[in-house]
Image (spheres, coloured by chain):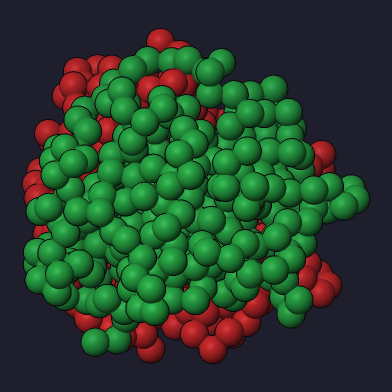
Chain colours: A green, B red
Amino acid sequence: MSTFAEDTAVTLAGPGRFRTTIAEGWDIAGVPNGGYVLAAAVRAMLASTNKADPITVTAHYLRPATPGPADITIDLAREGRTLSTLSASLRQGKGDVIRALGSFADLAAMEGPTLVSQAPPVLAPVEECVAVRPQEGAAFPPPFAARVDARIDPRAAGYLQGSPSGRAEIAGWLRLACGTAPDVVTLVLLADALAPPTFNAGIGPAWTPTVELTVHVRARPAPGWIAAAFRSRFVMGGLLESDGELWDSEGRLVALTRQLALSPRL
Amino acid sequence: MSTFAEDTAVTLAGPGRFRTTIAEGWDIAGVPNGGYVLAAAVRAMLASTNKADPITVTAHYLRPATPGPADITIDLAREGRTLSTLSASLRQGKGDVIRALGSFADLAAMEGPTLVSQAPPVLAPVEECVAVRPQEGAAFPPPFAARVDARIDPRAAGYLQGSPSGRAEIAGWLRLACGTAPDVVTLVLLADALAPPTFNAGIGPAWTPTVELTVHVRARPAPGWIAAAFRSRFVMGGLLESDGELWDSEGRLVALTRQLALSPRL
């Protein structure tokens, strides 16, 4: 079992109730990563429906998670023939950490017309990219970098050396550091695994807390690296969006992601 | 009071419980529009928090709404200093029509750095655009077109005359037909008010049911027309996304929207 699967495992605790343990090591600036926490809730949703794949999942982030036990409550709103929809809340001690909604389906059984007008991001080969490694005793890069292996495209790696590109964009290759091939739940994690694009626009490195994250899983990923590209077009009024694409090793779009975050005060 | 405000009004029915009436005339192919239904839920959420503005709202669509009474249940997950988050469900008779999550804030009180890398869509003047008018006895354009005044940019209006542009894009001007200036709740409606972009790519006109709709409200709109531009980049595996931008008459982005829909079988 992969570290990721172990660290997002859930156990049934009663009707619509699950337990999980938020593990150490997935944190950024001391707070467990938002994609990681949502992945645990998605596991509980998957265990509560007859569908195999999350196709759209949204989480609102209420309080920072902390390593330790958490309770997940699931409400199956509708189990349909094609789609099932569930609500989830993940709670620790004092209150809800996230509230989530998800719709699930069997991606392999779905069909329809194909019209794709966009190509995968053009990235330098993995070996020419810049590896993000956690630094002992330093807040940045964070411990999370030991869980998700990120290789940043040289054109977007300036933020790592204090020379941001000036464009609110980040792109690179991602995979689980434990070596497990990506599955649909991994995509939920990878939707929130790169530094905010704004780090390359001189806004940060600084805490950019996620208000809401939505992940559309569009296909089951092939084994191998995931190509990721994120950008922020509108930083204004204390808020920013981060729009992302995840592509698999066969050049297929596997997820579209968007989050709304609070922008750091400069 | 505007028709839109009247037709989305909610009345308190108990702690966390509201009543509304899904009105006639907001329907497309016999089904009340998804943005319209979500707007009623947003009114109930707004009545349950001390914040003035929805900043990110997501709805999952479970069953078609029908004109008539509906019950809305609200759960305030967290009332914070800057943000408040609420769950909502809108139910009619047999079950939930939508489940929603929203985070709310006071947009006028928020501040931070400004970095905007994209300009408003370039549209022909309103008087050179093609008005979408409902046709008596015809399914398309639908009755909804009498509630939202849509003027389609000539380059994206081909679908109305059976000669789609070939690109999965649609753009034009939008306003409430009742003449009321747009507010933040109007943006939730307008997030789902244009025909699917795929109508211009030869996929439809056909029923393209929304699975999930997320609206980021980024600013309170100025009075006047809203400039709207939507596109679908990835039609595949029975699903498609529609990504939209709404800009106000002062050239400011006021909302980013994305929905996941089931693509029509061709």
Q: Is A198 left, or right, of A68 in this rendering?
A: left
Residues B103 and A54: in front is A54
Residues B242 and B163: in front is B242
x then y, percent, for residue B229: 24, 46
Residues A264 and A183: in front is A183
Residue at 24%, 87% (x, y): give it. Answer: A266
| Image quadrant assignment for residue A205 | bottom left
Q: Is B98 left, or right, of A130 in this rendering?
A: right
x then y, percent, for residue B149: 33, 49
Q: Vertical placement of B250 versus B72: above or below?
A: below
Residues B89 and B113: in front is B113
Q: Is A191 left, or right, of A141 in this rendering?
A: right
| Image quadrant assignment for residue B131 | top left
Residue at 46%, 21% (x, y): give it. Answer: B238
Q: Residue furthest top?
A: B266
Residue at 57%, 41% (x, y): give it. Answer: A2
x then y, percent, for residue A24: 58, 65
Q: Residue furthest front?
A: A136
Q: Vertical placement of A23 versus A254: above or below?
A: below
x then y, percent, for residue B174: 29, 52
Q: Is residue B254 visible?
A: yes
Residue at 36%, 65% (x, y): give it. Answer: A134
Q: Is residue B250 visible?
A: no
The total number of labels drawn is 0
